[in-house]
Image (spheres, helix red, strand yellow):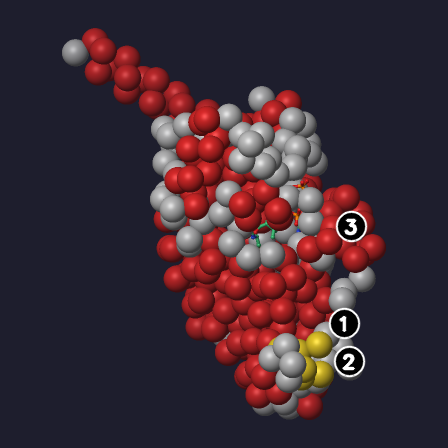
Amino acid sequence: MYAQMVKTSGNGVKTRDEMSDNERAFQDRIDAGEKIEPKDWMPDDYRLTLMRQIGQHAHSEIVGQLPEGNWITRAPTLERKAILIAKVQDEAGHGLYLYCAAETLGVSRDELIEELHAGRMKYSSIFNYPTLNWSDMGAVGWLVDGAAIMNQVPLQRTSYGPYSRAMVRVCKEESFHQRQGYSIMLKMATGTGAQKAMAQDSLNRFWYPSLMMFGPPDADSVHSEQSMAWKIKINTNDELRQKFVDQTIPQIEYLGLECPDKTVKWNDEKSGYDYAQPDWNEFFNVIKGNGPCNKERLAARVKAWEDGEWVRDGLLAHAKKKAARVAAE
Ligand code: BYC
């Protein structure tokens, strides 16, 4: 159902005159800042846009466990290991809240997972880059979770009730993730020369991919206009990217590291930094499935799903037996 319906979405923003009575009343509720709840009437495209965005967000959380999970066994201390396990576990929880929010729109979790495994649904481009050493755990927490929060804080005000409520909890946990990442970076950047060089190398590799997390430039963003009219998105991709750069440059300076973008310069007029765009050809290539780790990530998810079949079967068999017992009483 998801795949068939998505083909019909993305038809552009309707003017008030083009809207049906239902659509006009719906837009009025959005404009008045009301939350839309699962049983309320909503335009098909609103439902589809949310299924796509929340579904892809859920997939990002689950796939996002892989690059960090890779380092649990090699964390340098017991404390760092415990923190990393907690963080990776949080991501599973975020995936769960988001799949549940998507289910309230009428798409099952199994269906969304099938779409992911078939390569028809996306997940965040960032997770197609490898984590090569321990300081990458710092860069991921600091930059990747930092970019995620920048995007998710406004989403707490998104118009769809279940999504906005899921975001409240996710944001609280993400801010802990961001701090644990910065704490690793601080330790590395103030350590030995070799450790500082590792921190710099991680920043160099994760800077541009982090900027890509906010999506293509506004001029190339197909969904932004309609999503913003429906308050599914609160800010444009470029607005959030700018806020991220403005927040991160002073943090780089505090670490005593160098921004890989040598053109970064404070601009008094716009009260923000001017910065270089990432390579957008690379981004489009990554989201088409051709990034450094796309195949590996998807293969890991498919294997986990297949390996877990006996658990799902066992739970279903148990539920069936229990229901039969209750019925016989
Ligand atoms: N990666 O019209 P646009 C996290 C796609 S990670 C892949 O601007 P939209 C975490 C886009 O889907 C963050 N694909 O789209 C952190 C569309 O293709 P489709 C996850 C991308 O939806 C640490 C096409 O490009 N967060 O949380 O208006 C550990 C055109 O783009 C990307 C969310 O998902 C990308 N970076 O705006 C674990 C937040 N960017 O779908 C986990 C919620 C764009 O038509 N999502 N595309 O085939 C959003 O806010 C929006 O969906 C985006 C994109 C800003 C990402």
CB contact under 8 Å: marks 1 and 2: yes
What distance separates the C-alpha of mark 2 from that of mark 3? 23 Å
Residue 49 in sight in this render: yes
Residue that numbered label 1 is attached to: 276
**What type is the residue that disc 3 sits on?**
Phe
Helix, strand or loop for disc 2: loop
Query: Reading the chain from its start, which is encountered first: label 3 or label 1?
Result: 1
In front of the other: 307 or 66: 66
Left/right placement of residue 229 relative to residue 275 reads left
Position of the C terminus by quadrant: top left
Residue shown at the point (58%, 53%) measured from the top left: 64
- Spot occupied by residue 140 in the image (x, y as percentages of width and height): 60, 66
**What type is the residue that disc 2 sits on?**
Thr
What distance separates the C-alpha of mark 3 from that of mark 1? 17 Å
Residue that numbered label 3 is attached to: 284
- Spot occupied by residue 220 in the image (x, y as percentages of width and height): 74, 51
Position of the N terminus by quadrant: top right
